[in-house]
Amino acid sequence: MTQDEDVGQVGYRKPPRSARFTKGRSGNPKGRPKGSRRGTPYEAVLGQKVTIREEGIERKITAAEAFLLHLTKRGLEGDEPATRATLAALDGASTIWPGGHGQQIDTIVRRIISPGNPNSALLPLRMAVKLDRYRPTARIELEPWLIEAALARLGNRRLTLAEQKTVVQAARTPRKVDWPYWWKAQI
């Protein structure tokens, strides 16, 4: 019998002294094999490139950007939890991404709009939504926040009942618009 067995230190989770790790020597001397660590699983999934289609135009972005765009779209449609999640993600991204706030403008894009047709400006600015995104001549509807901002700019001026009906028909979601107290048109 060895000294360990005499004292009773050998058994479950108590190996003999000769088999124990020695002080100052690693239990894994070769270390982790190279290339076995590829980051978190989130990076592997959210870093992949996906193809999205906006207004009939396809472009490739990362899955993380696509996820954030989807959350933002739902938030703009009035989904409050999606709005909170988007704001939290953007707040976290601004601390991580070096080009966040204070980024310099390096390119100005000039787009010529045909007179009398503001659709080509409203759609890219996300002020309106096309009802049928695959038809070039489809009708568009205005976002609620844009209607609220335009009504706030009116000041003391009031719209006629016919103008009010036109605005209600042009709204994408008229029930989500915060109409002024003087509004008479059926919603």
Image (spheres, rainbow, N blue to C red):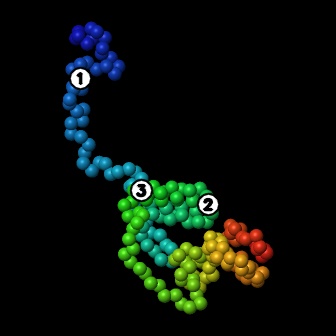
Tell me the residue that label 3 is attached to.
95
Q: Are marks 2 and 1 in contact (CB under 8 Å)?
A: no
Quarter of the rendering containing residue 15: top left
Tell me the residue that label 2 is attached to.
79
Tell me the residue that label 1 is attached to.
19
Which tag is nearer the camera, tag 3 or tag 1?
A: 3
Crowding around mark 1 (Cα neighbors within 10 Å: few <14, some 14 to 19, many 20+) is: few
Residue at 39%, 68% in the rendered image? 103
Residue at 63%, 63% in the rendered image? 78
Q: Residue 24, position in %: x, y?
A: 20, 29
What is the spatial separation of the Cα atoms under label 2 and label 1, in whole angstroms? Answer: 61 Å
Q: Secondary structure at mark 1?
A: helix
Residue at 61%, 58% in the rendered image? 80
Task: Point out the tag, 3 or 1, that comes first from the N-terminus.
Answer: 1
Which tag is nearer the camera, tag 3 or tag 2?
A: 3
Residue flagged by tag 1: what amino acid is it? Answer: Ala
Where's the N terminus, which quadrant? top left
Q: Residue 25, position in %: x, y?
A: 20, 30
Q: Is residue 7 left or right of residue 109?
A: left
Q: Secondary structure at mark 3?
A: helix
Q: Is residue 77 above or below residue 17?
A: below
What is the spatial separation of the Cα atoms under label 3 and label 2, in whole angstroms? Answer: 25 Å
Q: Is residue 5 above or below residue 110?
A: above
Residue at 57%, 59% in the rendered image? 83
Which tag is nearer the camera, tag 2 or tag 1?
A: 2
